Image (cartoon, helix red, strand yellow):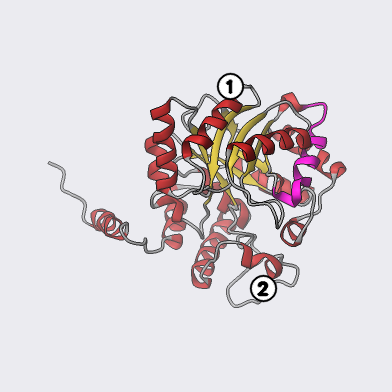
Amino acid sequence: MEYRRLGASGLRVPALSFGAGTFGGRGQLFGNWGTVGVEEARRLVDICLEAGVTMFDTADVYSDGASEEVLGAALKGRRDQALISTKTSLPLTDTDQGGSSRSRLLTACEAALRRLDTDHIDLYQLHAFDASTPIEETLSTLDGLVRAGKVRYIGVSNFAGWQLMKSLSTADRHHLTRYVAHQVYYSLVGRDYEWELMPLGLDQGVGAVVWSPLGWGRLTGKIRRGQPLPQQSRLHETASFGPPVPNELLYRVVDTAEDIAEETGRTVPQIALNWLLTRPTVSTVLIGARNEPQLRENLAAADWHLTQDQTTRLNKASTTTAPYPYFPYQRQEAFAQLNPSPVA
C-alpha cells in the first residue's frame, strides 16, 4: 500500500482508508448502508491491516455513535497498528443543536474517546461549519485538545472555500493548530471539488480525504444506461440523502469506465477509485464495505495504474461546465489545449 502525507503535515496515511459508516447499522440512512457488528468488523479490520490500510474513519453521528463503538471494539488489542479518524459537529438527536462551540467540542471529544475505547484520536474533524460560533473559539478549543494529547491532527469536512480559508488564516494569526485535512465529496460523477477547494488545498497544504468515491453508490457497475435501477440497490432508500447526479453524466461516465474495465480486466469501481488516486491533493480515499468480497474488490484498486489515454478518456467523460466565476477559466484552458502556443 502506498502511503502519502496528509496535507502539509508529517502524518503519513495509506492511499486507501476504511470508512466505517457500515458499522452499527442504526437509523434509516446508516441501516441501509450496512449492519456490520463487532465480529464481522474484526474480520474487515484484519483484511485492511494485512493490506496496509491502517486508517479507519468514522463519526459520532454514524448510527448514533454505534459505528465508533464497533470500531473501537474491532481495534481492541491492536490500537497501536491503526490511525483513527472521527468527526463531530452535526446534531446527534432531534434536541441536539450540534455545532463546534467549546462546550460541545470538549464534550463530544470525551464521548468519542470513550466509545472508541482509546486515549487519543489521530485525526479529529469538524463535520460541518458552525457559523454561530466564533472561529477563534473553535480553533482554540481544538488547539487545546491537541496540546492535551487527546487529538493528534485536526481537519474539517464539507467546508466551503471561504470557510476553510478564513479558518486557516485565523489559526495563523493566533498561532493555533492548523487544519491539515478536508474530508470532501469527490468522484468521477462529482468533480465540484476541483473548482475551488482543490486549488485551496494545493496552496495551503490541506489534503483531501475523499468520501463517497463511487458517487453515492452509483459507480458500482450495476447501474447502466437503458436499464432500471437494480432492485437490491440501496439508492432506492438513500439517494435523497446524497449528492445529485444527472443521469446523462452518470451514463457517460459508466460507459467509458466499462470500456476501460474490459481493457484492463478490472471492475468499474476499481476504475473509479484508481482515477481518484491520481488526482492532485488527494491524500487518501475512503472505501467502505458491508462484507469481505466488497472490501477485497475495493482494495484491489490500488495495485495498478490507469494509462494516460485511459485517464484522458475518463476526464473527458466526467467533465461538466463549471459554475461562475470558474467557467471562463475552464474555457481558456480548453482553448489553450486546442491551440498551443508555438515554441520559440
* Residue 126: quadrant of the picture: top right
**Name of the residue lying farthest toward the right:** 39
Whole-percent x and y of residue 10? 52, 24
Residue under label 1, please give it: 147
For the residue pair 108 and 11, the one nearer the viewer reads as 108
* Residue 166: quadrant of the picture: top left
**Name of the residue lying farthest toward the left:** 344
Whole-percent x and y of residue 58? 68, 43
In the rendered image, is residue 114 in sight? yes
Query: Dot 2: what SS?
Result: loop
Number of on-image labels: 2
Residue at 79% x, 40% y is 69
Query: Dot 1: what SS?
Result: helix
The amino acid type found where label 1 is placed reads Arg
Q: Is residue 322 above or below residue 292?
A: below
What kind of secondary structure does the magenta stretch mostly adopt? helix
Q: In the drawing, what numbered circle is on residue 229?
A: 2
* The magenta stretch spans residue 66: yes
* The magenta stretch spans residue 317: no
Residue at 64% x, 76% y is 227
Residue at 66% x, 44% y is 300
Q: Quadrant of the N terminus?
A: top right
Q: Is residue 3 above or below residue 63?
A: above
Q: Is residue 88 above or below residue 290?
A: above
Q: Is residue 308 left or right of residue 18?
A: left
Residue at 59% x, 78% y is 226
Crowd class of label 1 (few under 14; some 14 to 19; many from 20; radius 10 Å): few
Whole-percent x and y of residue 21? 71, 49
Crowd class of label 2 (few under 14; some 14 to 19; many from 20; radius 10 Å): some
- Span colored in magenta: 61-78
Between discs 2 and 1, the one toward the N terminus: 1
The amino acid type found where label 2 is placed reads Leu
